[in-house]
Image (cartoon, grey):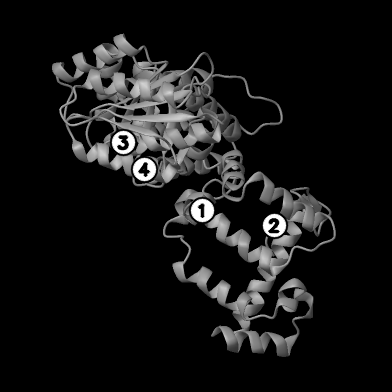
Amino acid sequence: MFDLLSGRLESVFKRLRSKGVIGEKDLREGLREVKLALLEADVHYQVVKDLLGRLEEKVIGTERIKGVSPAHQVVKVVYEELVETLGKAHQGLKLDGAGPIVILLLGLQGSGKTTTAAKIARYCQRKEKRPFLIAADIYRPAAIEQLTILAGRAGVPIHPAGEGDRVFEAVSAGMEAARSANADVVIIDSAGRLHCDPEMIAELQDLVRRFRPQETLLVIDGMTGQDGVNIAGTFHREVGLTGVILTKMEGDARGGAALSIYGVTGSPIKFIGIGEGIDDLEAFYPERMASRILNQGDIVTLVEKAQRALGEEELGRIEKKVKGKGEFDLDDFLMSIRQLRKMGPVSQLLKMVPGLNASQLDGVEMDPGQLSRVEAIILSMTPEERRHPGILNGSRRQRVARGSGASVQEVNRLLNQYHGMVKMFKLGGKPMKGKKGKKEFRSWP
């Protein structure tokens, strides 16, 4: 997601930073390259034109801020304008008010709409709501079956349209079932079509008129680029959208749709889908996404992922053990690694760490067998050794290596990682004094 655009923008800023003095010619050349990078990312031409106009006005001829290098000033302006282009500020779901809150999902076939319905239900569960799903895609029976399976995994009640039901009948019966189940959020998975035909639009207009959803959300495949923007424009004109959800953003999506939707339709992006799992849905924050695009990381989202993966209780337990009596042992270490794997692919997580260049992370991924080797090493230790790793002297490490089929070097590496994690928890993110007396952040040795 945004890797190509991030790489191009980073090369522009690197070139500007390498110059002692930046003149108007340098700035115009930099802006031209920014324009080309945006067009290559399939950003809508009108959005590119508006964005470049604002950038040119703010970058060229603007008085330099004292103490800030010209290159950093340019990056700051680009960041601010990207936030503006992406939607200014986060706009979440409207989940408050007299229930049940109705959320209508619509979109074309293949956009990931049905899976997204289950993801929204899981999101509502995390917000301590009682969601209810209505499978109203009467034209594709497989969609009803798919949503029923996903609802079962999430533990969310569902009303599937019956054979021969019309859309209005299916949704009406589903609303009655939702009220009987005391649900406070109802998510309607409407039918997807191959294109925006008049019959489809009329059906959606009827659903909006009859059931008055608080949220009418369009689900778009994030890889469609400007086609997705045109689709969004049609739906917004004919039905009236309250927001957009972009799916499949974990793949090779160039980001054109994300950067164009708000500028063309005025509809905010509320979520992005980042995988097939039922929890692979992220709330969309323009300022966080702008930071990712500019390779400045997204530490807030990374922390939120950790909280979801480990849970507040588990994080609190680990912190208490480490900061209390230092009893964070290798059993805890193994459990933490297992849980953190739920956060997603390592390459995606690393891109959220400030200071890491996305272009340098291509192909970075955890070896699926790595966790198995870690487990084998730890489980080859005695309970006493796992509780008190400090007693693992040379002969004990050799025995553990033989028992796990690993090398002594791998055992040593694992122990170093364990001690690094303990240090990280004990520091709590506070800066330490570096070798030259400067403050620095330390994590892994």
Q: Which residue is mark 1?
A: 342
Tell me, yes or no, whether the two marked residues, 4 and 3, touch with CB atoms within 8 Å.
yes
Of callouts 3 and 1, the N-terminal one: 3
CB under 8 Å between discs 2 and 1: no
3 or 1: mark nearer the eye: 3
Which residue type carries mark 3? Thr
Report the side of 372 relative to 119 (left or right): right
If you read the primary sequence from the N terminus, does the residue marked by circle 3 or circle 2 appear first? 3
- SS category of the residue bearing label 4: helix
Residue 398 is situated, as x and y percent measured from the top left of the image, at 66, 89
Lateral position of residue 79 relative to residue 242, left or right: right
Question: Residue tagged by mark 4?
Answer: 150
Front-most of 45 and 346?
Answer: 346
- Give the label on residue 443, or none: 2
Q: Position of residue 368 (x, y in %)?
A: 45, 67
Which quadrant: the N terminus? top left
Query: Which residue is at a point 62% across and 20% down the rendered structure image?
Result: 63
Q: CA distance from mark 4 to mark 3?
A: 9 Å
Q: Label 3: which residue?
A: 114
Assess disc 4: are there few (<14), some (14-19) or many (≥20) residues with their C-alpha within 10 Å of its C-alpha. many
Q: Nearer the viewer, residue 36 or 342?
A: 342
